[in-house]
Amino acid sequence: MACDTRSAPSVPRIEVRHSWARIADSGATSGAYLEIANNDTVAITLVGVTTNDAGAAEVHETMQHDGMAHMMPRTEVRIPAGDVLTMAPGGLHVMLVDVRRAFVIGDSVRLRLRFSDSTTVDVTAPVQTP
């Protein structure tokens, strides 16, 4: 009997899916949205996002207070083991401040996600309309 020595493809410890960014004029503010799957057996913590495509990239969360929507910066976001963090319009998102060029459909935005264990994940988010 032959033995199959091929191993199954490994699943990345941190997997980013469904990334996209909003269209924006140069100098404006935009948003980026994505899912981060923690395929590890321990929690991970997102501690920052950087980009060369905007003056700043900050994780924000939109919250309702007294009937008004407010955005609050989040310095870290914990993702439990085996869980998925979804960033979507009206909730958690990456705020891109002072974009350095117009973001148009067909373009993409490059992001680098930083985690508390020094792991980084590079993401290319296509520009789309919501």
Image (cartoon, helix red, strand yellow):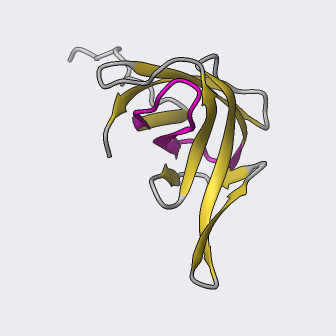
Front position in the image: 56 or 100: 100
Number of numbered discs overlaid on the protein picture: 0
Where does the image place residue 32, in percent across and percent down from the top left? 50, 39
Q: In the drawing, does residue 103 fall left or right of residue 71?
A: left
Q: In the drawing, does residue 52 fall left or right of residue 19?
A: right
Choose top left, top right, bottom left or bottom right for residue 80: bottom right
- Seen as rendered, the residue at the extreme left is 1
Above or below 64: residue 81: above
- Seen as rendered, the residue at the extreme bottom is 66
Where does the image place residue 71, in percent across and percent down from the top left? 65, 60
| Span highlighted in magenta in the image | 19-46
Front position in the image: 88 or 101: 101
Q: Does the magenta stretch include residue 24?
A: yes
Give me the residue at 79% from left, 38% from top. Answer: 116
Choose top left, top right, bottom left or bottom right for residue 49: top right
Give me the residue at 38% from left, 20% from top. Answer: 7
Where does the image place residue 83, in percent across and percent down from the top left? 52, 54
**Quadrant including the N terminus:** top left
Choose top left, top right, bottom left or bottom right for residue 66: bottom right
Give me the residue at 37% from left, 29% from top. Answer: 127
Could you tell me if residue 45 is visible in this image? yes
Front position in the image: 36 or 104: 104
Where does the image place residue 70, in percent across and percent down from the top left? 64, 66
Q: Does the magenta stretch include residue 83?
A: no
Give me the residue at 44% from left, 26% from top. Answer: 10
Could you tell me if residue 42 is visible in this image? no
